[in-house]
Image (tube, rainbow, N blue to C red):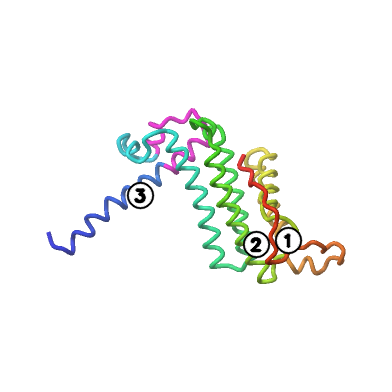
Amino acid sequence: MSNNAKPAATRTPRADAQRNRIRLMEAAKTLFAKKGPRASLDEIARTAGVGTGTFYRHFPTRDALIAAVYQNETERLVAAAERLGRSQSPLAALREWLLLFVDFIATKHGMHEVLNTIVGGASNLYSTSSTRVRLAIETLVDRGVSEGSISLNLDPVSLLHALAGVAKVGSGAEGERAAKRLVDIVITGITAAHHKSLPAQRRSGVRKLPGRRRRSPVRSK
C-alpha cells in the first residue's frame, strides 16, 4: 500500500464512528422526548441504524448516553452563539440565538424525566450547562452594548429566565411558540433606538459597559 493511501484508511473509521455517535444521540433525543424513561437502548440503536455492539462502544451505560445528549445540545447552543456573533449584527445574532435557546429549553423539557433517572442526579450537568449558557448570552449582549445597538438594565440571564418560564407554563408546542413570540418583544425592548424614544426617567439604570452586574444562576429545570 502506498504512503498516500494510509491517511485515508485511518480517517474513514473515525468519520464513520462520529456519524454513528451523532445518529445515536439524535435518535435518543427523539425517543426520550416521545417516550421518556420507557425508551429502550435497543430501540435507540435500531432507530439510529446501528448494532448493539456499536451502541455500547460509544455509550457503555444509559447514563452516559443521557449525559452525552444533554451535553451535545448545550455544545450546539454555545457554538451557535460564537458563529452568530461572527456572522451577524449584534441584535440579529442575539435574536437568532434566543430562538435557538427556546428550542434548547424544549429539548430539556422533553428529557426531564430521563435526566431525573441519572444515578446521583443531574445537578452537575445542569451546573456546567448553566455556566456555559450564561457566558454565551453575556458575550452576545456585551457586544451589542459596546456597539451601541443594545441597552439593557438587567442581568442578561433574566431574559433566559423569562423565555424558559413562558415555554414551561405553556402546553407543549404552544408554550414553545409563545416563547418564540416573546423573543421579538424582548429584542424590541432592549434595542437602543427604542430606549432613546422613551422618557428620560424610564431609561434610568440602563446597562453600560464595563460595569459588572450581579450574577444569578441560570435555572435549568
Residue 54 lies, in percent from the top left, at 31, 39
The earlier-in-sequence mark between 3 and 2 is: 3
Q: Secondary structure at mark 3?
A: helix
Residue furthest top as drawn:
38
Q: Choose top left, top right, bottom left or bottom right for residue 58.
A: top left
Above or below 108: residue 100: below
The quadrant the C terminus occupies is top right
Q: Which mark is residue 18?
A: 3
The earlier-in-sequence mark between 2 and 1 is: 2
Mark 1, residue position: 152
From the viewer's perspective, tell me whether residue 82 is left or right of residue 61. right
Range drawn in magenta: 25-47
Which residue is drawn at the image coordinates 23% and 59% (left, top)?
8
Q: Amino acid at mark 2?
A: Val
Which residue is drawn at the image coordinates 55% and 63% (left, top)?
84
Q: What whole-number distance in Å separates the C-alpha atoms at marks 1 and 3? A: 41 Å
Q: Nearer the viewer, residue 219 or 44?
A: 219
Frontmost of labels 1 and 3 is: 1
Frontmost of labels 3 and 2 is: 2
Q: Secondary structure at mark 1?
A: loop
Q: Amino acid at mark 3?
A: Gln
The quadrant the N terminus occupies is bottom left
